[in-house]
Image (cartoon, rainbow, N blue to C red):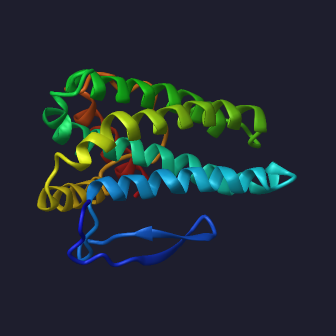
Amino acid sequence: MLCFRHFIIAPLLFLGRPIVTVSSSQSIGIIDLILSEHQHMRDEYEYFKSVDDITKLDSRVRQWIAYIALHGHKEEIAFYPKVESYLKDEKKGGHHLIEHGIKEHRELETELKKLAEQPIVQWKQIHKSVDKLMHHLKEEEADILKPLRSKLDKKLQLDLAQQFIDAGKLASNRPHPELSKEPEKAPQENIDIGRAEKHKDL
């Protein structure tokens, strides 16, 4: 079990509800940081289901899309490349697990992009996105995060968490299904497209 040196929870109102966030002065391991973001994705979907008219949540759904896209891009920049070697002894092999994870990101981003391009979000496309999302979260948590918890020491988990946070300053928060599915190319492509978008938005 991971013990935190300084486990500080800072509430941030994101999409209308408090979530756990961390800054460079706080310490939470990479596994729990990723899991907290996964839970937020699930919680938002559960909230969507409680609303009778989803069109009233159009803006919130679009923020959810951006949150999911950014999360995946951060993983590809600062998590997957750093942990592949620690998964080499797993039955499926580290490279295959990471490659499969990126492939699932692209499939999810395909559905998220279709959802983002709708004039008003519709349940049918939300469901298609959620099917891909839930499948990916379940596999990543079982095949990557669970075995890594015992393989990454405390210091490395904290270091990777900070790198993951820093990657958010580089990564795009828009779905990009056209990005490479290859683990060797995906990190730099993510950085390049994120920088281009941020420069354009200035």
Which is more toward the observer, 123 or 59? 123
* Point 61% across, 56% down: residue: 43
Depth check, front residue: 105 or 46: 46
Residue in view at x 16 percent, y 61 percent: 154
Residue at the spot x=45%, y=55% of the render?
Answer: 37
Q: Residue at x 44, y 58 (%)?
A: 36
Q: Is residue 168 visible?
A: no
198 above or below 90?
Answer: below
Task: Judge left or right: residue 198 versus residue 119.
Answer: left
State which quadrant residue 114 falls in. Answer: top right
- Relative to residue 20, is residue 63 depicted above or below? above
Q: How many marks?
A: 0
**Percent x, y of residue 105:** 43, 31
Which image quarter: residue 190?
top left
Viewer-closest of 97 and 76: 97
Picture coordinates of residue 77 (x, y %)?
A: 26, 42
Residue 57, placed above or below residue 114: below
How far across and down, in percent of the image, does residue 90 sit?
A: 22, 27
Quarter of the figure with the N terminus: bottom left
Place of residue 124 in the rendered image (x, y in percent of width and height, measured from the top left): 76, 32
Q: In this view, which residue lies farthest toward the right?
A: 52
Q: Looking at the image, can residue 151 be seen? A: yes
State the image quarter where residue 9 is shown.
Answer: bottom left
